Amino acid sequence: MITAALMTVIGVLVAVETISALLGRPVRWVPYDRMLGWASSTPWSDPWVMLGASVVTALGLLLVLLALVPGRPRFIPARTGDPDLVIGVQRRGFTRSLAHAARQVQGVDHARVRLHGTTAQVTAGSHLRDTTGLAEAVRLAVADRIAALAPVDDYPVRVNLRGR
């Protein structure tokens, strides 16, 4: 996004400079006369030119590498009754469903689920003073919901219970 915004700003700047020069009233936001003079008198072997070319090349390679690295998937693949069919469940919907399952456990007031890789991290809160076995009940409820949703990957459940 940063690269796209930067390229948009540069494109607008070039367009304004070009159009204003063609209309006979250059805005001269960029002092290109000095840059043109420097560029026409500087040989390719100049250390500053080589440094600039190296920086631009390194940035280009970095952008190519960033484009090749896969991002976080938008969907979680889930099985269906048909062995040849896999559907995608949105990550947000998946975590909401798991949080809802955790909230259904007796004694849980609120719950939030976050996915860390293929681990479901449940943070649940309870008003109960004695929370013995509550964390395990939440873990089982969330694990049952995961089994019902049938994701392709295994999602072990970790529960962090906060009592009052």
Image (spheres, rainbow, N blue to C red):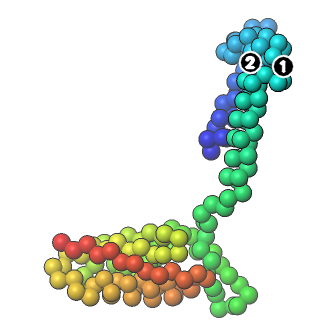
Quadrant in which the N terminus is drawn: top right
Determine which quarter of the picture holds residue 103.
bottom left
Distance from Cα at disc 1 to Cα at disc 2: 27 Å
User: Residue 157: x and y, percent?
Assistant: 43, 80
Residue 45: tell me if it is visible.
yes
131 or 40, which is in the foreground? 40
Q: Is residue 162 above or below residue 30?
A: below
Q: Helix, strand or loop at disc 2?
A: helix
> Could you say where residue 54 lies in the image, as x and y percent from the top left?
74, 35
Secondary structure, mark 1, is: loop
Q: Percent position (x, y) of residue 87?
A: 65, 79
Near mark 1 (Cα within 10 A), the count class, few <14, some 14-19 or many ≥20, is few
Q: Is the C terminus in the top left, top right, bottom left or bottom right quadrant?
A: bottom left
The label on residue 140 is: none
Give the amino acid type for the residue marked by disc 1 in the picture.
Answer: Pro
Using residue 54 as the reference point, say whether residue 103 is left or right of it: left
> Could you tell me which residue is drawn at 72 percent across and 57 percent down?
68
Total count of labels? 2
**Would you say residue 96 is visible in this rendering?**
no
Residue drawn 26% across the image and 88% down it: 133
For label 1, the residue is: 43
Left or right of residue 72: residue 18 = right
Query: Which is more toward the observer, 5 or 46?
Result: 46
Q: Considering only order in the chain, which callout, 2 or 1, is on the residue closer to the N terminus?
A: 2
Residue to which mark 2 is pinned: 17
